[in-house]
Image: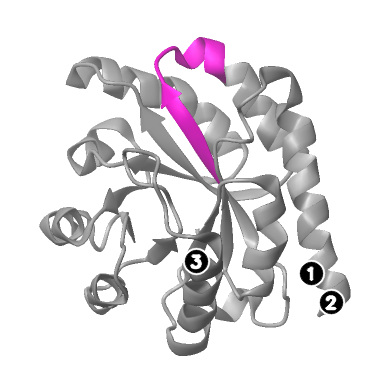
Amino acid sequence: MATGRSEYANSPRPRLYLVTPAVEDPRAFGAALSDAFGAADFAALLLRLAPSDERTKINRIKALAPLVQKAEAALILDGHPELVAKSGADGAHLSGIDAFMDAVEQLKPDWIAGAGGFFTRHDAMLAAEKSADYVMLGEPNERGHRQPFDDIVDRVSWWAEVFQVPCVAYAARLEEVAPLAQAGADFIALGDFVFGDPDRVAANVTAAMQQLATTDALA
């Protein structure tokens, strides 16, 4: 996963960042994941894990890792920085400034340290100053609540104008993809709508790609 803007400076199209639901059975989820990877190129996968003991979580990560590696995407764990080295993941996504500050030195420089879960600009800036590899904006909290979408677009635009640290903008719905791309996001995180219907995973990803294509026409 790129950690700077230069690679994409001449293209208005951000890359995709895939977010999974909480995975309990990696074998059952593998087919849906393969469908998603077959429909588009993804820079990274944010793997959420259902609650369990440490060994079971590691086994789940290792079971899905070959699919992610075949797709040439970075495997990023949602939390669990202590499992990154043990599981062969590429990094961790830390939600909230306290969680990020506690884990960043454990991860850097060998692994990706992503940051998110920020509801103030100040906390996002603190993470950037502490060498976050990216900052995610717009993701819902653990209760499913998020800022109004217009505020998220405004924050993504502000970030793109001011900071070099890449921005991952979280699209909770398909129709959010194009506005977030137009606001200047480096990556678009595709939220739960992708995996909401196991029979439409590829179609949902394809639709997201079509949304991104509209930003090319407007560039």
- Marks 1/2: CA–CA distance: 5 Å
Mark 2 crowdedness (10 Å alpha carbons): few <14, some 14-19, many ≥20: few
Mark 1 crowdedness (10 Å alpha carbons): few <14, some 14-19, many ≥20: some
- Residue 94 x/y as whole percent: 27, 51
Q: Which residues are magenta?
A: 18-29
Q: Is residue 97 left or right of residue 7?
A: left
What element does badge 2 sit on? helix
Q: Residue furthest toward the right?
A: 217
Residue plotted at (67% across, 22% down): 197
Residue position for label 2: 218
Residue position for label 1: 215
Q: Quadrant of the C terminus?
A: bottom right
User: Relative to 9, is 119 above or below?
Assistant: above
- Marks 3/1: CA–CA distance: 18 Å
- Residue 216 x/y as whole percent: 83, 71
Residue type marked 1: Thr
Residue type marked 3: Ile
Task: Say which label, 3 or 2, has the lower sequence index.
Answer: 3
Residue 65 is covered by the magenta coloring: no
Task: Say which label, 3 or 1, has the lower sequence index.
Answer: 3
Quick check: can you spot residue 14? yes
